[in-house]
Amino acid sequence: MFEKDETLPICDQCSGIVKTATISFGQAMPLVEMQAAENETMACDLFLAIGSSLVVYPAAGFPEISKRNGARLVILNRDPTPLDGIADLVMNSEIGPTLSAVVDFD
């Protein structure tokens, strides 16, 4: 529907936006996209982990891969994560206001 006319699909019951492209626990991640993410992770010099608990694998392993390949790791999450100990910078704060401050920085 969105690709056709940019109309967001709305749930008839709750009026929320229907998100169709989801992965459920136990469901395999898309192989092509995961390989592309791993390739980018291995090539980066700065990895930003924003708004993730970093507990759901395999995606939660990408920050560790980046560190092993020499990248700096920045974690921005409201709560602590299991990977805070390997990060170069950890910011436990709200994502919206924090990123807004970065964008508004002069």
Image (cartoon, rainbow, N blue to C red):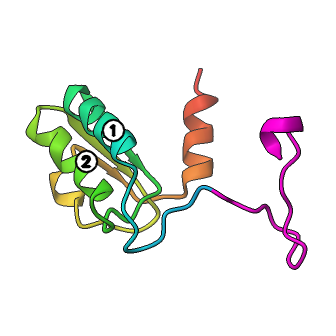
Separation (CA) of disc 1 from disc 2: 8 Å
Give the residue at x 34% y 50%.
75
Sort mark 1 into few (<14), some (14-19) or many (20+) by Cα contacts within 10 Å: some
Give the residue at x 84% y 69%.
11
Place of residue 65 in the rendered image (x, y in percent of width and height, measured from the top left): 16, 44
Residue range highlighted in magenta: 1-20
Circle on res. 37: 1
Would you say residue 11 sits in the magenta stretch?
yes
Place of residue 40 in the rendered image (x, y in percent of width and height, measured from the top left): 29, 30
Residue tagged 2:
62
Between discs 1 and 2, the one toward the N terminus: 1
The amino acid sitting under disc 2 is Phe
Query: Which SS class for mark 1?
Result: helix
Query: Which SS class for mark 2?
Result: helix
Give the residue at x 88% y 70%.
15
Sort mark 2 into few (<14), some (14-19) or many (20+) by Cα contacts within 10 Å: many
Q: Are marks 1 and 2 in contact (CB under 8 Å)?
A: yes
Residue 53 lies, with reference to residue 26, above or below; the image says above
Viewed as shown, does residue 79 lie left or right of 42?
right
Would you say residue 5 sits in the magenta stretch?
yes
Which residue is outermost to the bottom?
13
Give the residue at x 62% y 50%.
96
